[in-house]
Image (tube, rainbow, N blue to C red):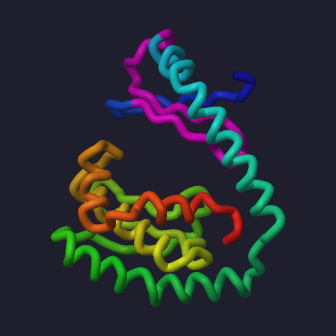
Amino acid sequence: MDYPIEIVRSDRTTVSIEITRELTVRVRAPKGLPDAELQSIVEKHAQWIEKHMEITRRRNEARMSYELTEEDAERLKALARRVIPPKVEHYARIMGVKPKSVKITSAHSRFGSCSGQNGLCFSYILMRYPEEAIDYVVVHELAHIKHHNHSKSFYALIGKYMPDYKRREAMLREDQY
């Protein structure tokens, strides 16, 4: 692998690998994990890293071809504030979960997130995607209230409420929006 690797150590218990917008491999790891073990984990995920480097490269190119004006961004933020909270309320009731808060952010690297305290954040960029994809992100983040990971149980929970979630998730990877 010829990519820059950034190691971020903290009090976490698991290892995560992400590809930044700048095409850096960011590895988050527990403080006590030996370097050799960390290197082994990165090598084991080389195929995943290659695939996601290419996805990120394509997204960067698509982003450069369509930059939002300040006016467009403000319009999408206002739309997100109107659309997303009712969707969260609807799906939370169906799923039997209660988020601590719902915020609209300007994040460009992720569509949504769920904090350890069950606060949900959604990027206004979601408003550029079909409603089905927006609903998927809402259900995905609400599922994190029960499962703070991406385990089989997590995806089974999503599938219970949204059997076609894989199709919806694929919409988020399309660069046309």
- Note whether 104 is above or below 81 in the view shown: above
Q: Is residue 96 left or right of residue 160?
A: left
The location of residue 152, given as percent across then percent down, is 29, 44
Q: Residue furthest right?
A: 65
As drawn, 169 above or below 20? below
Residue at 44 percent across and 28 percent down: it is 29
Decide: is 162 above or below 60.
below
Does residue 28 belong to the magenta stretch? Answer: yes
For the N terminus, the quadrant is top right
Q: Which quarter of the figure is the C terminus placed in?
A: bottom right
State the image coordinates of residue 71 (x, y, percent, origin top left): 73, 87
Q: Residue furthest top?
A: 36
* Horizontal side, residue 100 vs residue 140: left or right: left
Return the x and y of residue 50 as percentages of the image width and height: 66, 33
Q: How many numbered marks are there?
A: 0
Where residue 88 sits, quadrant-wise, is: bottom left
Q: Is residue 21 in the magenta section?
A: yes
Q: Which residues are magenta?
A: 15-36
Residue at 56% over, 28% down: 7
Image quadrant assignment for residue 69: bottom right
Judge by depth and name the residue closer to the eye, 43 or 162. 162
Q: Is residue 108 left or right of residue 91?
A: right
Across and down, in percent, residue 114 comes to: 36, 59
